[in-house]
Amino acid sequence: MDSFVIEGGRRLDGTIRINGSKNAALPLMAAALLTDQPVTLRGVPDLADIGNMRRLLAELGVEFSGDPGAPRLKVTDEGESHARYDIVRTMRASICVLGPMLARRGEARVSMPGGCAIGDRPVDLHLRGLRALGAQIDLDGGDIIARAPGGRLRGDTIFLGGAFGSTVLGTANVMSAATLAEGTTVIESAACEPEVVDLARLLTAMGAKIEGAGSPRITVHGVHRLGGADHAVIPDRIEAATYMCAAAITNGSLVLEDCPLDCLLAVTDRLEAVGVRVELLGPCPDMLRCRCRVTAERVLRPIEVTTQPHPGFPTDVQAQLMALLCLAEGNSVITEKIFPERFLHVAELSRMGARLFRQGNTVVVSGVRALKGAPVMASDLRASAGLVLAGLAAQGTTTVNRVYHLDRGYEKMEERLAAVGARIERVSDREG
């Protein structure tokens, strides 16, 4: 397994362009199952999760052509509707093929998904929404089997709220399925995340009739068929937030290009409270693709933050912010409301000298003057990023093991950080 070896204490300085969003690209790719016409996606990042989705869609009859960063997807065979466990177990987002395949082909068989060990993420809300559209749902051998009686779903009013708020992939699944359903579908307590809005833009370009994307109520008027489209994936707001934290934790200065500031208001609000400055550089006609400079004051201030569904502070930035707050003066409080068990990085940061006290879904971070390099173990995608940030600021050498987690969501992170001054390298088989 690969590891990152980081010599900390080097100030980052330079420019990083933000890649296309992984969390947007995956359901966008799945949307190609809704039509027999070509769909071109521009700005698709080169990530492990993207590669797994390509393999899955290829098994489901999708042919890929063109540049990997701007692939052309076209369904050439609709005879296979089984998303097998061997692929689905590698990433949770595989579930987003369920709605499109069911709506277009009248049936779908999808293995229960896998993914990161960050807590319980049941698919019951997905199934509740599809049942409301008339689907018959069964479970057999670990597979979800869904059928549309008569071959077509029917519109209905659906409440998609759950114990920890709305569901992004569940909203994507139901919204995609509803585009080809008979009649009108109203999704109440829909996820408001920018990735849902981006999916709605693609579906609309394909001929869908969707209102309210980005709000808690989405209305979909079903159509008989969808066509092809050419669509640019939005920049990755989580990647942008990660590099903002990287600039701050190293007391550096990074210019971020194609930064989706309009999606990051909760993040920039909390960062500015810490003492991080995010300066817009020049005019920005598209607030999803800005150019900005990120710097930090020498003394970081403690804050309180609670993760929430969008437009609140994203759970996917919690670990990175925790790493930064380890160096703030005073006590910060982080409360996790989306995935209450998403604290596997706490023990690893403690190995580096962080003072962290967890009680339930809250962690108190008592700032220290410096972190110390140490061998640490990555447990999930965003925890990995948090540990890399801590290593960039720590005194001495930090080895982050099992960075395959990180490769799921960050394209060539070590090369991009090295280009702006980090001393970081990827090493293979360090675990023997």
Image (cartoon, rainbow, N blue to C red):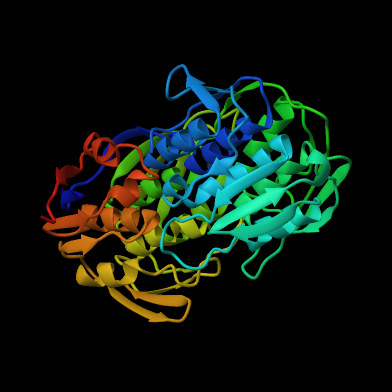
Image coordinates for residue 177, horizontal then vertical, percent: 72, 42
Q: Nearer the viewer, residue 326 or 91?
A: 91
**From the viewer's perspective, is 391 left or right of 176?**
left
Residue 381, above or below 235: below
Image coordinates for residue 382, horizontal then vertical, percent: 39, 55
Residue 182, above or below 206: below
Identify which residue is drawn at 73% across, 40% down: 106
**From the viewer's perspective, is 253 left or right of 422?**
right
Identify which residue is drawn at 44% across, 55% down: 115
Identify which residue is drawn at 65% across, 21% down: 229
Task: Please say whether residue 83 is visible from this viewpoint.
Answer: yes
> Residue 39 occupies which quadrant of the picture?
top right
Which quadrant would the C terminus be assigned to in this image? Answer: bottom left
Q: Nearer the viewer, residue 98 or 170?
A: 98
Q: Nearer the viewer, residue 352 or 151?
A: 151
Image coordinates for residue 125, horizontal then vertical, percent: 67, 60
